[in-house]
Image (cartoon, rainbow, N blue to C red):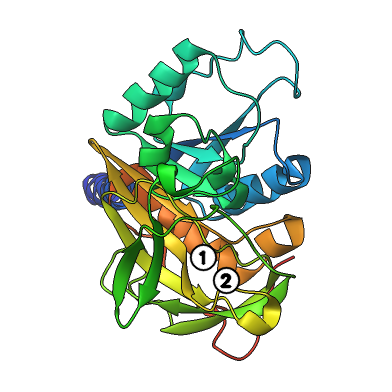
C-alpha cells in the first residue's frame, strides 16, 4: 500500500470514528441533575435516601446530590438548597417548616418549570403550606380534613373528588397488594403491565387536598379485610403546577420496599417525567406481573 493510500485510509478511519462519537453524543441524553431532600421524616429517611440515590444513578439517567436539613427542633434558618441548579427535586422529607425564603424559592422553582418527585411520606409534609399542597395534589395526616380539600379516589372507571368530612390519611397493616394502571397512555405508565404485584407495604388511603390538575395513573384497592377504606386509592399521580410537573408515588415505606421493582420502575420513570415531560427509561424485563413481587439487591 502506497503512503498516499495509507494516509487516505487512516483519514477515513478517523473520520468514521469521530462521526460515531458525535452520533453517540447526539443520541445519548445528557444526565439529569436530581436533588434528594431529607433530614426529617416520620419514616427512616436515612435508610431510604441511599436506596433512592442508588436507583437513580444506576438507571444511567441521573446524577444525584442530597440536601439534608437540620434535625427536628433545630435552627432551620440556614437551610437554603440551591433548587435552581437541578432538573428535579425528590422529596424524602416531612418535618419542621422551612424558612419563608426557602419556601418561596421552592415555589418559584416548580412554578417556573422545575420537576418534583414526592416519595411516600413526602405527601405528609407541610399541611399548612397551601402551595405545597397544590403541588402534591393530595396528602395525609398533619391535621388534614375537609378544609384541606376533597378525598380523591377511583370508582366506576373515573376519578372521584369526594367532599365528605373526615380526616386525611390512613393505612392498614403492610401487605402485598395489587397495583392497577388506570391511565395506560401517560408516559410514566405507558408499557407497564395493567396490573402488577407490589411487596408488603403501607397502602396509603383517604388522602385529600386541593386535587387540582391531577391525573390518577394507578391505584390499589384498600381491602376492608386489611382495615382499608374499601376504595381504589391513588398510588401513582401526575400533577401540573404552573410550568412544572410533579410526580407522586404512594409506595416506598422503607429501604426494603424501595428495592422492590414495583417501586423502582414507576419511581424512575415518574422522576424522569417530572424533570423533562418525557420518559426514556424502559420497562425492564424483571417488571413483576400480578402474581408475585420482585426485588433487586
| Tag 2 residue | 262
Q: CA distance from mark 2 to mark 1?
A: 6 Å
**Residue 189, located in which quarter of the rendered image?**
bottom left
Where residue 175 appears, as percent x and y from the top left, is: 71, 76
Residue at point 56% right, 20% down? Answer: 98
For disc 1, the neighbor class at 10 Å (few under 14, some 14 to 19, many from 20) is: many
Relative height, residue 222 to residue 54 (above, below): below
| Tag 1 residue | 265
Residue at point 61% right, 48% down? Answer: 121
Relative height, residue 109 to residue 273 (above, below): above
- Residue 225 vs residue 64, the one in the foreground: 225
Q: Is residue 14 left or right of residue 221?
A: left
Where residue 164 appears, as percent x and y from the top left, is: 41, 60
- Residue 52 vs residue 22, the one in the foreground: 52
Where residue 265 appears, as percent x and y from the top left, is: 51, 65
Residue at point 66% right, 68% down? Answer: 260
- Observer able to see residue 232: yes
Q: Are marks 2 and 1 in contact (CB under 8 Å)?
A: yes
* Kind of element beneath mark 2: helix
- Residue 191 tag number: none
Q: Of all residues shown, which one is farthest toward the bottom?
A: 291
Amino acid at each position: 500500500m502506497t503512503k498516499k493510500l495509507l494516509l487516505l485510509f487512516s483519514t477515513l478511519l478517523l473520520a468514521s470514528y469521530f462521526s460515531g462519537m458525535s452520533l453517540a453524543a447526539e443520541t445519548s441524553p445528557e444526565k439529569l441533575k436530581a436533588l434528594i431532600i431529607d433530614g426529617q421524616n416520620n419514616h427512616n429517611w436515612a435508610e431510604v435516601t441511599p436506596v433512592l440515590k442508588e436507583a437513580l444513578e444506576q438507571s444511567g439517567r441521573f446524577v444525584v446530590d442530597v440536601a439534608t436539613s437540620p434535625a427536628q427542633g433545630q435552627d432551620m434558618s440556614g437551610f437554603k438548597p440551591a433548587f435552581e441548579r437541578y432538573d428535579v427535586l425528590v422529596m424524602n422529607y416531612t418535618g419542621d417548616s422551612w424558612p419563608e425564603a426557602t419556601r418561596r424559592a421552592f415555589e418559584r422553582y416548580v412554578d417556573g418549570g422545575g420537576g418534583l418527585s414526592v416519595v411516600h411520606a413526602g405527601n405528609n409534609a407541610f399541611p399548612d403550606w397551601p402551595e405545597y399542597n397544590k403541588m402534591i395534589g393530595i396528602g395525609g395526616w398533619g391535621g388534614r380534613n375537609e378544609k384541606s380539600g376533597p378525598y380523591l379516589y377511583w370508582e366506576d372507571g373515573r376519578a372521584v373528588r369526594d367532599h365528605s368530612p373526615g380526616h386525611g390519611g390512613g393505612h392498614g397493616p403492610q401487605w402485598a397488594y395489587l397495583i392497577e394502571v388506570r391511565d395506560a397512555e401517560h408516559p410514566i405508565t405507558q408499557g407497564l403491565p395493567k396490573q402488577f404485584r407490589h411487596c408488603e407495604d403501607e397502602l396509603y388511603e383517604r388522602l385529600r387536598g386541593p386535587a387540582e390538575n391531577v391525573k390518577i395513573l394507578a391505584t390499589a384497592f384498600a381491602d376492608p379485610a386489611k382495615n382499608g377504606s374499601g376504595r381504589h386509592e391513588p398510588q401513582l399521580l401526575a400533577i401540573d403546577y404552573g410550568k412544572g410537573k410533579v410526580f407522586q408515588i404512594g409506595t416506598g415505606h422503607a429501604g426494603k420496599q424501595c428495592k422492590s421493582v414495583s417501586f423502582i420502575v414507576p419511581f424512575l420513570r415518574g422522576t424522569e417525567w417530572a424533570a423533562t415531560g418525557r420518559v426514556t427509561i424502559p420497562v425492564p424485563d424483571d417488571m413483576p406481573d400480578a402474581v408475585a413481587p420482585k426485588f433487586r439487591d
